[in-house]
Image: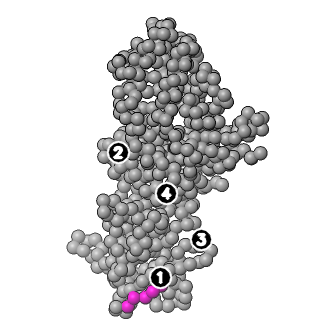
Amino acid sequence: MVEATNFIEQIINEELESGKVNSVYTRFPPEPNGYLHIGHAKSLCINFGIKEKYNGKCNLFLDDTNPSKEKTEFVNAIKEDIKWLGFSWDKETYASDFFPKIYELAIELIKKGKAFVCDMNAEEISQNRGTLTQAGKESPWRNRSVEENLDLFTRMKNGEFADGEKCLRAKIDMASPNINMRDPVIYRILRQTHHRTGDEWCIYPMYDYAHPICDYMQGVTHSICTLEFEDHRPLYDWVGIELGFAPKPRQIEFARLNVTNLVMSKRYLKKLVEDGSVEGWDDPRMPTLTGLRNRGIPAQALKDFCGRIGVSKANSEVQISYFEACVREYLNANAERAMAVLNPLKVTITNYPENQTESLDFEINPSDELKRTRKIDFSKTIYIDQDDFSLAPPPKYFRLKKDGYVRLKSAYIIKCDDVLFNEDGSVKELLCSYVPESKSGSDTSGIKTKGVIQWVNAEKGKDVEIRQYGYLLNDEEYAGQDFSERMNKQSVKIFNGKVEPYVLDNADDRPYQLMRTGYFKLLNVKDKTILSEIVSLKDNFNVKK
């Protein structure tokens, strides 16, 4: 028996042991009405993780029962995201694959007296549904004959009625304590071109009705859903029981993933794209999987995060800092090191030979067991970051100052001898001297420095746009406010910096730790090369394994 690590696996183990099921079949069931976001990653990891753990199967099931919001673009994006996470589905299925069967089964419910055609519109149905403490009112058309219901439903399918003029409702119990069981609508008239079936249908099944049928038709044993579907489970079971499904799939609910500072609603994400607040669904600030991928978040780090937060029955909110800590931990072990400066300040090393370039060893990653190095070029003129020099340094300032020393990463110790100014009084250039005996790895100078700063060779360094990101939403103290009120209007900072050529020469998806700056990857936006921040270096969260 497989060792269970959460309550879902405990249920599966019990059913396997009792013989209720002989194998495990799940499905990942997104609606193709937008791009997947970080919340969907948890569901992906659960459903495909169960497949892998129990040597079972998992389908990609596209719930395309609402053609007014669904697009082939979203279908393709969903498939790309799943592949990026390293998962593979056994079958690619759609609710629309089963439209004929779903329609036939609706006719079966009508013949059993379990469904009727109702002339009430959506507003009237809602008004008569009742409350949590008050029973609903039965529809005046609830007791139509089977023959009349069959005729009207056929005419609905044939397009004889206007949108919203009639609907098909399940006949259950208007006094049920569960409002979802009060004669729910199971078919509505909707004249919208479907992304797969075109205009073949003008009636479409509701999700709660189609869901259990599609699960059964695929052979799904366990329908894993988020917690908001818990109140819909009696309807899921009712459909399966009334239609004689054997074995009937079992629905199990888990708590969805909520993360502070992130927009976790497709509707709001779509709004951000449409109103131009972001540059698209793949904007690096977006919590969509395509946005995270574009930002440079490693798929393995995201899966590790989902594994660490676990599977629970109670809704909760995870701190964004925990997610970042998981990403940072992975990148610290796997990202190559490189150097860049966000705000370049020219430094001339006055006692370094003219026209000389020296090749120095630079460690690729301190975590690398092989201790590999690569070469970087050092010469008379370099750039450092403006923030690494101060005319009036505060106490315990260990970077460069007038008449002070600092070590250049993997190079030499330098001393600031003089400062040149612009007309406006800002610092234009530093004139420094280097200590020849202080070369990294063979320092015999005896000079002790506490500060080590990054630098870029002025002759070979490349101009690059560097972007650092904040959160799209201001922090959780604003909880309860509409997303539009919590939007961070300064969620991106842009710098015109310098980077060593090695980074641009390796224009692929590899991440880099830019020393003392953050983790970055190259991003191409509108034919422009950008160094885009993956995550900062600051780590205030203690990741517990």
Hey, what amino acid is under mark 3?
Answer: Ser
Check disc 4 and report the residue beneath it. Answer: 297
Q: Which mark is residue 375?
A: 1
- Looking at the image, is 496 positioned above or below residue 317? below
Residue 359 on the magenta segment: yes
Residue 182 place in picture, x, y as percent: 53, 16
Residue 500 place in picture, x, y as percent: 40, 75
Whichever of callouts 2 and 3 sits on the residue coming sooner in the sequence is 2
Distance between the alpha carbons at the discs numbered 1 and 3? 18 Å
Check disc 3 and report the residue beneath it. Answer: 367
Residue furthest bottom in the image: 353
Residue 385 on the magenta segment: no
Whichever of callouts 2 and 4 sits on the residue coming sooner in the sequence is 2
Tell which of 331 and 397 is nearer to you.
Answer: 331
What range of the chain is rendered magenta? 356-360
Q: Residue at x 55, y 12 (%)?
A: 113
Hey, what amino acid is under mark 4?
Answer: Ile
Hey, what amino acid is under mark 2?
Answer: Val
Residue furthest left in the image: 423
For label 2, the crowd category at 10 Å Cα-Cα, with few meaning under 14, some 14 to 19 and many 20 or more, is: some
For label 3, the crowd category at 10 Å Cα-Cα, with few meaning under 14, some 14 to 19 and many 20 or more, is: some
Position of residue 307 in the picture relative to residue 102 (left or right) = right
